[in-house]
Amino acid sequence: MKAFSLLFMGFLTFFVISASNPKLDKAPSFNDSIDQLRPESSSEARNTAGLFPTNEEEKNKSLLAFDVILKVLKDPRCINCHPTDDRPRQGDDQHLHLFNVRRGKTNQGGPIQFCSGCHGDDNNVYSGVPGAPHWGLAPKSMGWLGLSDYEIGQKFISKSSNGQRSPEALAKHMTEDALVLWGWNPGENRKPVQVPFEEFKKAVADWLDNGAHVPSK
Amino acid sequence: MKSKINFTINGKQTSVEVNLEMPLLWVIRDELNLKGTKFGCGRAMCGACSVHVDGELVRSCSFAIKRAQGKSITTIEGLSESEENLHPIQQAWIDENVLQCGYCQTGFMMAGAKLIEEFSDPTDEDIKANISNICRCGTHPRIISAIKRAASLKKSNS
Ligand code: FES
Ligand code: FES
C-alpha cells in the first residue's frame, strides 16, 4: 500500500511539474539552456529585483533544490578548486595539490608553475592530467572548503563575493561554464560529480524559480 | 588522424604532421630528434620533460601538440645561443658540478632558468617552493647552490 502511495505521489509530482512547466516535456540534458527548463512565467517573476518575494512553499522548494546544489558545490570535483586558502586540492580525499601548487596572483598558479604548465583545455589522454578551458582556482572570495552550508550559501549568493553574479547569472554559470561541466566529464580514473547532471540542472532551475533562497543560520 | 602543426622551436620555424593529441615531448624527441629533454614519468609528476612554451615553464609530457600551434618553444638545446655564450644556469651548473647520473638535470635547468627570471636573489625557500622536479640521485643541495649562483651571474651579466 505504502509503495503504491509513493508511486502515485511520484506520478502526481511529475504531472504537476510537467503541467506547470510547458517547456519541460522531456528529460533535461547537457544541450538545454537553463532557460529551457524554467517556467514561462518565471522571467516576469525574476524581474521583481534580485531575490523576489516568495511564499513559504516556494521558499521550501528553493531550499530543497539548494540542498542538491550544495552536494555539487561540495563534491571533490568542484570544491577542490574552491579552497578558502591558497592551495588547490586533489583527489576524492582532497589532499593538497602535489608540487606545492599555489593560487598565485591570477588564481592560475605561478610565479613559476602555472596551472597551464600541465593542464590544457581538455583531459590529456597521455598523461592523464585533467583539463578544461580556463583551468584554475575559483577566486578566494568563492572559497568553500571547510565552510558550513550557511556560510557557503552566503558567499554563493552575495554579489560582493560571487563575482557580481545575479542568481540568473549563477544558474547560467553552473549549468553552462565549460570548467563547471568538466565535473561530469573528469576523465579516466576520476569519479564524476555524484549528482547526475540532469538532476543538478533541474535543481538549479527549481532553486531559481522559487526565489533563489539559501539556508539561514 | 594526423594534422599539420606549425611552431617555432629554439628560434627555428618548424612544422610537424602528427596526431594532435601527441605529447609535445614525443615530438621534441622522436620527430625533431632533440634528445636533451627527457621522459621520466609521462604523468606530469617528475619535471624531467620541462621546456618553455612562450616563456612559460611546461611539462611537455602533458602538453598535447595541438596546443603548440603558433607558439615559441625553447628546449635545453636552445637555452643559450652558443657554447661560447652559455646561459647563466648552464654556466652555474658547470661551476657547481651539479650532475650525478644527469637524467633529471635538463628539466631542473629549464625550471631554474625560469626561476631566476622571477627571483633576482632566490632563497633556498624560493627554490624549494617553486621547483617541484624530482632527482633520484639526490643532487638537490647542488641544484640549489647552482640556481643561486646563476641568479648572481645573471645580475653581473646585465
Ligand atoms: S616526464 Fe613529464 S613530468 Fe615526468
Ligand atoms: S642526477 Fe640522477 S636523477 Fe637527478
Image (cartoon, rainbow, N blue to C red):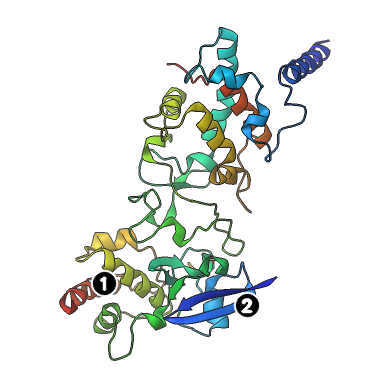
Total marks placed: 2
Question: Tag 2: residue type?
Answer: Glu
Q: Secondary structure at mark 2?
A: strand
Determine whether label 2 and label 1 are within 8 Å by CB. Answer: no
Q: Position of residue A158 (x, y in %)?
A: 41, 26
Q: Position of residue A197 (x, y in %)?
A: 65, 36
Give the residue at x 59% y 22%.
A43
On the question of residue B38 being in view, the answer is: no
Give the residue at x 47% y 21%.
A50
Tag nearer the camera, 2 or 1 = 2
Tell me the residue that label 2 is attached to: B17
Q: Which disc number belongs to residue B147?
A: 1
Q: Position of residue B120 (x, y in %)?
A: 21, 66
In the rendered image, the quadrant that contains the N terminus of chain B is bottom right
Q: Disc 1: which chain?
A: B
Q: Which disc number belongs to residue A63?
A: none
Compare marks 2 and 1 and give the one earlier in the sequence. 2
In the rendered structure, the answer to whether residue A11 lies left or right of residue A159 reads: right
Looking at this view, is B139 or B82 the one in front?
B82
In the rendered structure, the answer to whether residue A83 lies left or right of residue A54 reads: left
